[in-house]
Image (tube, rainbow, N blue to C red):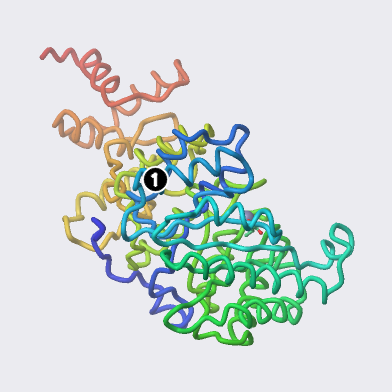
Amino acid sequence: STKYRAFAPVRLTDRTWPDAVITKPPVWCSVDLRDGNQALIEPMDIDRKVQMFEQLVKIGFKEIEVGFPSASQVEFDFMRKLIEENRIPDDVTVQVLTQAREHLIRRTFEALQGVPRAIVHLYNATAPVMRRVVLNMSEDEIVELAATNAQMFRDIAAQNPGTKWTFQYSPEMYSDTELEFSKRVIDAVTDVWQPTPENKCIINLPTTVEHSTPNIFADMVEWTHRNIKRRDSVVISVHPHNDRGTGTAAAELSLMAGADRLEGCLFGNGERTGNLDVVNVALNMYIQGVNPGLDFSNIDEIRATVEHCNQLPVHPRHPYVGDLVYTSFSGSHQDAIKKAFAAHKDGDIWDMPYLPIDPKDLGRSYEAVIRVNSQSGKGGIAYLLESEYGLQLPRRLQIEFSQVVQREMDASGKELSAAALWELFQREYGVHT
Ligand code: KIV
Ligand code: ZN
């Protein structure tokens, strides 16, 4: 149930191999309230956490990592609030993270008492640098750590049969871990959990720090997808970060390589350069004709909530949402857009030069698309006067008036709004209304 209208699949399938396109959306999991939150200068208080949670639900996330309850009292209290105030919709599953340490696991399950459904997410580092330098543990000890704590999950969950439990495991720094070794750890965990096709567990593969090109990560995901035990009982999730600026590409290639699920944050908040930007991936899918199952039809409202909760601005050129992304400054772009708008009818495939998506689909407008500054030509000026004031300028007058506009802008160095253009036109030609 989304407001998005389906676009006819755009061109890609004709041009490339059919298996090199994404044909269905993944299971989305928002980690805004956990990974995103832990990277904020000032982590969210409970009120902001509630606002973010409600926004995520409204967008349509069905899996939401709401926090790390053993990490602080606010995190614990927020989990309790969601449960005690019945704030979790029936079709949403909350997820919480814990390190592989007994007292933290016990505290995590304590925070979850009485929850109808939950994903409990266990992690420990597996990469050589962590084993050698930070943890001082052998490979066998890491496998043992993961398996023992996985068993603790099973034991505690068995004492709380009123909840529908799903278990998730992340080999932290998976992308820097030897593939054979990460398989060994993952298999050890699923040996304990014994998932079935009816009751799957989630194996989440993070690029905790993104070091390599996205095709390398996708090849790793594909290898894991083909080689782990019990593949039919496991949901393969990926959790890209964006250190190289290629988190989106890593996510998209991973989906083509066999991943079922994506974890990320709205507009790419998260540790360092951020987590995967889920809005970016979802809307990339949308413009390829795949309904992402997330509703961004009021993207400015979403952005306002996220900026308020994170206390961080979204860049004006951020894909799909930035203030400037539906604005055309160059005259030739403006002219092409004007012609394509004139030819476009509601319901047509979006076939528009220089605008990858219909801004209306995100609650943005074309009114703002054409602005006039020193880079623009007569086409943009004529378009604004016609669309805003119904004034159709004959071609010769367009040329003449554009010179007037150019002089005005050269003098002021500023761009002109439609209202300023109209005022200038009235002044120049002695029009009185
Ligand atoms: O980036 C990461 O490795 C994580 C894990 C805890 C999943 O956030
Ligand atoms: Zn992360």
Where is the C terminus found, in terms of image quarters?
Answer: top left
Task: Place residue 63 in its image quadrant.
Answer: bottom left
Q: Nearer the viewer, residue 72 or 406?
A: 72
In the picture, residue 144 is in which quadrant?
bottom right
| Vertical comparison of 231 with 265: above or below | below
Judged from the image, the secondary structure of the residue bearing numbered disc 1 is: helix
Horizontal relation, residue 210 to residue 239: left or right: right
In terms of image quarters, where does ligand 1 lie?
A: bottom right
Tell me if 159 is positioned left or right of 213 in this view.
left
Q: Amino acid at mark 1?
A: Glu
Residue 152 drawn at (x, y percent)? 64, 68
- The image shows residue 290, relative to residue 408, as above or below, that is below
Residue shown at 28% from the left, 59% from the top: 350
Q: Quadrant of residue 332?
A: top left
Q: Considering depth in this image, is 225 or 384 the residue closer to the camera? A: 225
**The residue positioned farthest toward the left in the image shown:** 433
- The residue that appears at 63% across and 87% down in the rendered structure is 227
The residue that mark 1 highlights is 84
Query: Which residue is rendered at x = 36% and y = 36% of the image?
Result: 377
Q: Nearer the viewer, residue 106 or 177?
A: 106
Taking the view exactly as shown, the residue that stands out farthest to the front is 159
Cβ of mark 1 under 8 A from ligand 1: no
- Residue 228, image x and y in percent? 63, 84
Please tell me whether residue 178 is drawn above or below residue 396 in the rendered image.
below
In the rendered image of this protein, does residue 250 appear above or below residue 278? below
Horizontal arrangement in the rendering, residue 221 relative to residue 371 (left or right): right
Dot 1: few (<14), some (14–19), or many (≥20) neighbours within 10 Å? few
Pick the front one: 82 or 102: 102
List x then y, in percent, for residue 391: 15, 30
If the image is split into quadrants, where does the N terminus sit? Answer: bottom left
The residue positioned 20% from the left and 50% from the top of the image is 342
